[in-house]
Amino acid sequence: MFYIHDNACISPQRTFPEAESDLEQISEASEGKLFAREPAYDKIPLGVLRRMGKAARMGVGAAMELVTQKPDGIVIGTSEGGLEDCIKFLNQIIEYKEGVLTPTNFVQSTTNAIAAQIGLLSANKGYNCTHAHRGLSFENAMLDAYMLLEEGKKKKYLLGAVDEISAYNYNIERLGGSYKSDPVKGPELYEMHTAGTIAGEGAAMFLVNKSADSAIAHVQDIKTLHTRDVARVATELRAFLTKNEKQMARTSLLISGENGDERVQKYYSACEEVLGPNIPVARYKHISGEYGTANSFALWLATRILQGHPLPAHFYKHAAPVSPVSSILIYNNYKGLQHSFILVTDPQETPYLA
């Protein structure tokens, strides 16, 4: 599909800037929410920064590390980007009785505000698109970037995903049973065996093209589907393994989107059963939380692993890999309905066949 050459990630943990990443120490959830650790955003003009909503700050802040490499376009995925500002604007309509309203919240309230801000601040006049497909927003952005690269094989694109914890949406999801009512600490999330998970937020950005030279990871293939049928998920995974037989034969790690919600655990268990007991399983939502584009954090983790940065022990469900990892399968499902498989491999071992 395409190669990743650079990345940046703002998350609830010490992941930004990349050179200072530290995943050993875990920042715990506060009242069931894993809030992002926001940096100083030195590369965003202060006059612009103070008007930005949180989703825009995170997305632009992570992207500014990469746009200096002059991508030919910007492709962003977001499940709820800008929702917090949208609610603020709607409340103002009621509060001021449709009188003089603050334009900032309106401007920041659309899902495409993040990609637009990145384009404006970097003077990027190329392709600019935002995908909002709930739990498959990032995956659809990946497919869009792939198609663009198929059309222009020498081009490069900024690919990313952003989501924030919206107070309004969090309350709705909490009342709907999406989040746990009891406090959770780190990996204990997976041991509670109850309904619900913890909320998270973050932004992950990637610079992608079709060249293997100096690449840090190769996105080999991706598959998405909508279903609540566990058997179909297992069947689709087997088909995905067969399609990528040569690469999957070397798969040495599964990055699982397991989130501690017993209602969706059956999907993850089915996938682990298909892969067999010899494939180590790494979990990450105890440090990222659950949100629509959490899979972008998983991809960021995969690129780190392929660069030779081992994951701390708290990530692993069982034993860690005993040999260097060269092929990683990422599986995620969102609310038991939207599923995705992403195969990420060592770019030096899987040359792209144009």
Image (spheres, rainbow, N blue to C red):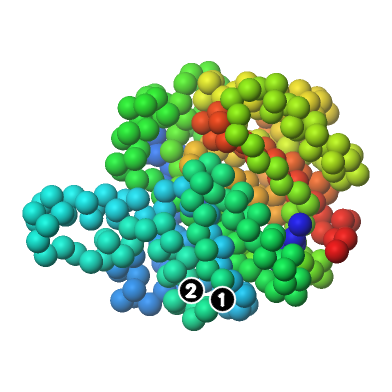
* Numbered disc 1: secondary structure: loop
Q: Is residue 300 above or below residue 294?
A: below
343 or 232: which is nearer to us? 232
Q: Position of residue 205 (x, y in %)?
A: 58, 61
Residue at 35 percent of width and 50 percent of height: 83
Left or right: residue 143 compared with residue 61: right
- Circle 1 residues within 10 Å: few <14, some 14–19, many ≥20: few
For residue 110, which quarter of the picture?
Answer: bottom left
151 or 15: which is nearer to us? 151
Q: Amino acid at mark 2?
A: Gly
State the residue lying farthest toward the bottom: 123
Q: Position of residue 224 (x, y in %)?
A: 66, 41
Left or right: residue 54 compared with residue 221: left
Closer to the camera: disc 2 or disc 1?
Answer: 1
Q: For the N terminus, give its image quadrant.
A: bottom right
Label placed on residue 126 = 1
Quote the CA–CA distance across marks 2 and 1. Answer: 8 Å
Q: Kindly identify which residue carries mark 2.
A: 119
Q: Is residue 76 above or below residue 214?
A: above
298 or 36: which is nearer to us? 298
Residue at 69 percent of width and 61 percent of height: 147
The answer to whether residue 323 shows anywhere in this view is no
For residue 253, which quarter of the picture?
Answer: top right
Q: Amino acid at mark 1?
A: Gly
Q: Position of residue 185 (x, y in %)?
A: 47, 32
Quick one: label 2 or label 1, which is nearer the N terminus? 2
Q: For the C terminus, give its image quadrant.
A: bottom right
Residue at 29 percent of width and 53 percent of height: 86
For residue 113, which quarter of the picture?
Answer: bottom left
The answer to whether residue 224 shows anywhere in this view is yes
